[in-house]
Image (cartoon, rainbow, N blue to C red):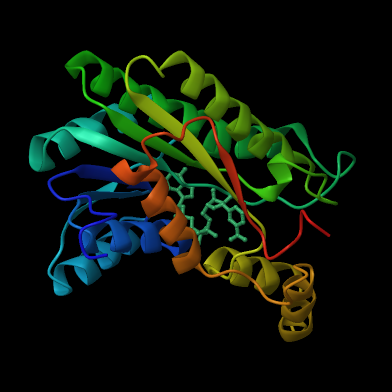
Amino acid sequence: MADILRLDDRTALVTGAGSGIGSAIATLFASRGAKTAILDRDLAAATKAAAKIHEAGGRAIAIECDVSSPEAMTQAFDRTEAELGPLTVVVNNAGVAAVGGVLETTPEELDRVYAVNVRGVYLGTREGVSRMKARGDRGAILNLASIASLIGVSDRFAYSMSKGAVLTMTYSTAIDHMKDGIRCNCICPARIHTPFVDGYLKANYPGEEEAMFQKLAEYQPMGRMGTPEEVATMALYLCSDEASFITGGAFPLDGGVLVS
Ligand SMILES: NC(=O)c1ccc[n+]([C@@H]2O[C@H](COP(=O)([O-])OP(=O)(O)OC[C@H]3O[C@@H](n4cnc5c(N)ncnc54)[C@H](O)[C@@H]3O)[C@@H](O)[C@H]2O)c1
């Protein structure tokens, strides 16, 4: 087992890796031998995540970057390749939440969610694919979608719009770049316990956090939320050579939501 799911000598870039799922992915990838770039608009969080990796003996750099900015993304990818070598793994993980149905969603809110969750994934994919293709490198792009990409989730109009686009961008990239040896897949998690969830509860249900936490946990038929580490393990597999026959896949990680 020690020899499988290794990313030795590979350079991996993870967006939004200062927190939650992205941080768990970067940490696991580094522990499997990858040189890892941690992009986040929150530099302090990215620096903390990189420090944790250094302490464990891994290699990581922290880069402040807003994924919705084409210039910032080009600079961050350039810096990653200059410091860590050619990128062959890109994880488009950065994302923001939004609550409300179509009637509560303002045009500004729709654009805010689009900028990060759709434009950010497009820019990360474009940067990754163009570099891998120009060099003739095989590589993997992994996107963080959601069960909202696959089923209706109530009160999540803007978020579902964005995660539907992540799913179809995954299909599009997979089919267009199969012959280039570039694979593209996405993970579709149900609720995962991250600061994303804690922040949502604090902002929307002050004083009732515990009861609401339980309600969100019970949405999954298994009666709990997933962990960032469970998502990271699936991410490692999908970005490793062991998954070299898999592209255009959308993989639920959902505690039984879709089957029930
Ligand atoms: N937590 C869940 O229940 C859940 C479920 C399904 C899908 N997801 C998806 O997984 C991904 C990660 O979620 P999480 O729960 O770890 O979130 P999180 O809020 O814990 O972390 C997201 C990170 O992204 C960064 N970020 C936000 N906007 C950015 C931008 N414009 N540029 C760069 N960085 C930015 C934040 O600073 C933060 O560090 C998201 O795409 C989310 O939609 C999460």
Decide if residue 216 is in sight here: yes
Residue at 46%, 14% in the rendered image: 176
Decide if residue 240 is in sight here: no
Counting from the top left corner in percent of width and height, residue 133 is at: 27, 17
- Horizontal relation, residue 107 to residue 81: left or right: right
Residue at 32%, 22% in the rendered image: 181
The one nearer the camera, 36 or 47, is 36
In which quarter of the view is residue 110 placed?
Answer: top right
Counting from the top left corner in percent of width and height, residue 114 is at: 61, 33
The one nearer the camera, 52 or 73, is 52
In which quarter of the view is residue 130 placed?
Answer: top left
Counting from the top left corner in percent of width and height, residue 244 is at: 36, 36
* Quarter of the figure that contains the C terminus: bottom right
Residue at 65%, 32% in the rendered image: 111
Q: From the viewer's perspective, is residue 83 above or below residue 71?
A: below
Counting from the top left corner in percent of width and height, residue 29 is at: 28, 56
Question: Given the current orientation, which residue lies at the most extreme right position?
Answer: 103
Q: From the viewer's perspective, is residue 176 above or below residue 83?
A: above
How many discs mark residues in the rendered view? 0
The one nearer the camera, 32 or 166, is 32
- Horizontal relation, residue 2 to residue 235: left or right: left
* Quarter of the figure that contains the N terminus: bottom left
Q: From the viewer's perspective, is residue 52 above or below residue 109?
A: below
Residue at 66%, 65% in the rendered image: 200
